[in-house]
Amino acid sequence: MRRSRPALRPVRYAYTAPSRQKVLGALPVVASVCRQLDLAGIIDRLCPVRKVAIVSHGQVIEALIANRLTSPQPMVRIEEWAREWAVPEVFGIEADALNDDRIGRALDAIAPKHELIAGSVGAQAIARFGLDVSQMHWDMTSISLYGAYEEPTPGFVTPRWGRPKDRRPDLKQVQTGLAVTTDGGVPVWHRPYDGGAAEVAQVESAMRSLQELAGRRQFLLIGDSKLISRGNVIAMNLAGVKFIAPGSKYHVPLERLSALDRGAATLVEYVAERDTGKPPAQRAVYRILEGTVMIAGKRAADPELEVRCVFVWSSVRAHAAATNRTKKLNRARGDLERLQRGLGGRHYPDAAAVAERLRAIRRQHKVDAYLRTEVDSSPAGKPTLAWHFDQDALQKEEASEGWYGLLTNLEPGEADATEVLVRYKAQETVERRYGNLKGPLAVAPLFLSSNRRITALVTVICLALLIFCLVERGVRRALSPQLTLAGLYAGRPAMPTGRLIFEALSGLRLNPASDGGLPTIPQPKPLQARLLELLDVDPTRPRWAS
């Protein structure tokens, strides 16, 4: 329960600017969405503070979220940021209350409740904003960490070595899972995971949480190939959850793909978003075939599981694969020719040195599937090398290029092959949100003193992403059926994205009260005023004045 405080006086517009201003930016927008989500209220009910506390945990977390959305720099010196920005006027929190110690206590408080907070705020977002959760997209990403973390606190995410997606193998990591709606690309659910957690093993628990979040509504879960395992498919079938995901090479092997007949495949009337506006001849072409695949169990006694598979051929994938293969072969050929010219020299004096170099070439250029070599020594002791690319293996790979299989438990009567492809194509939504996470929200390698606070900070970051996406969705829905907004990108019309919206609002300023007067806001620019109108936000009404 937070201490009661007098309402702040309303702010009015002014056309003159005094010598000192505070940055207002998108703070009124962030505060408005926080209020609609009841974010501080949810946190305060789950993590209450003493009645004598100056600010509640919910207020502190809202301020941290606002900081991440408006000033995405390393999360340090929050107190200084709050002084420069209109945080007291909008959120009713004095800058001194956001010192490092108070922020640390708020993070410690929400860490044990992070799952309840994520679920409650996600449910509120669905109800308050009318989000359609009939189709959701699931994926995981990694966040790298500075620090050793030798003795992590039990019960919270554990930093571990892994395969970081930001290509920082020198750092430990934790992972984050997101479930994003097709409707607006809103991340309604998130969860942090240990750095070494296998993604395929997290699917069933994530599915259960999403079922609870969706209530009685049936939903379609779309993911990448790690969504698919025999156990996950059985669990989703039993739970009545529909799914679509591409099959891995283990479930849809090269031999199966190379045997498919493109001529027998049906041409799909589908235009990818990136091809909109292009002449028909320059658009990607898709062809589909219906089929099934069998998923074997780990034990010989486990019966095989038959799963519907929509085989898709993509001209874009085929062209990319052919181009990549040609580059690999040319680079490998160049290294092999250089190796052959150097046989017997100081770098490759014997067969062992040649064999070691060949292993490096196979690994570096990924040509092991079709590179055939024979290393020997001449009577004089000079190493010899014969090599060639296996044409049969190359032809088999070429025949498979462009093909992939989409596994699903949707019946043909629920979604034909074309509909399965179209629904899967929305999977880029969750990938785009991870781009927002590490782009506009600037989630760089983190450094915190404990894995307890890492768990809490991941929650703060994901809640900030939720608000970021709700703002983007709100503007787009208010504009519909228009697709662009004038002046948004370099003075030109553009599709409103969260990044462009927050950048446009960043120029708003506030003139602090002085000599007993009222705080004032200089008249917004036309674009800023239009965005605030579309979001139904009145910047002259501070967060805590209502």
Image (spheres, rainbow, N blue to C red):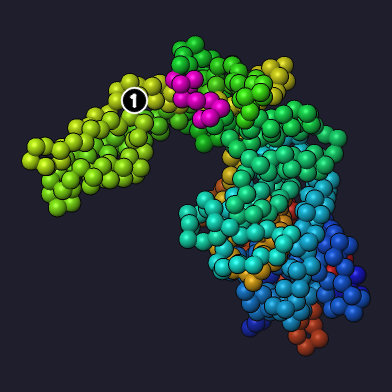
The x and y percentages for residue 116 are 81, 54
Name the residue furthest top.
264
Relative side of 144 to 523, left or right: left
User: Residue sitting at 30 percent across and 32 percent down?
Assistant: 371
User: Residue sitting at 60 percent across and 55 percent down?
Assistant: 195
State which region is magenta: 249-258
Image position of 536 with respect to 93: above or below:
above
Image position of 108 with respect to 478: above or below:
below
Which of the two residues, 131 or 458, is positioned nearer the viewer here? 458
Quadrant where the N terminus sits is: bottom right
- Reading the image, the residue beneath label 1 is 394
The x and y percentages for residue 509 are 66, 71
Which of the two residues, 500 or 422, is positioned nearer the viewer here? 422
Q: In which quarter of the image is residue 523?
A: bottom right
- The amino acid pointed to by label 1 is Leu
Which of the two residues, 393 or 538, is positioned nearer the viewer here? 393
The x and y percentages for residue 292 are 60, 18
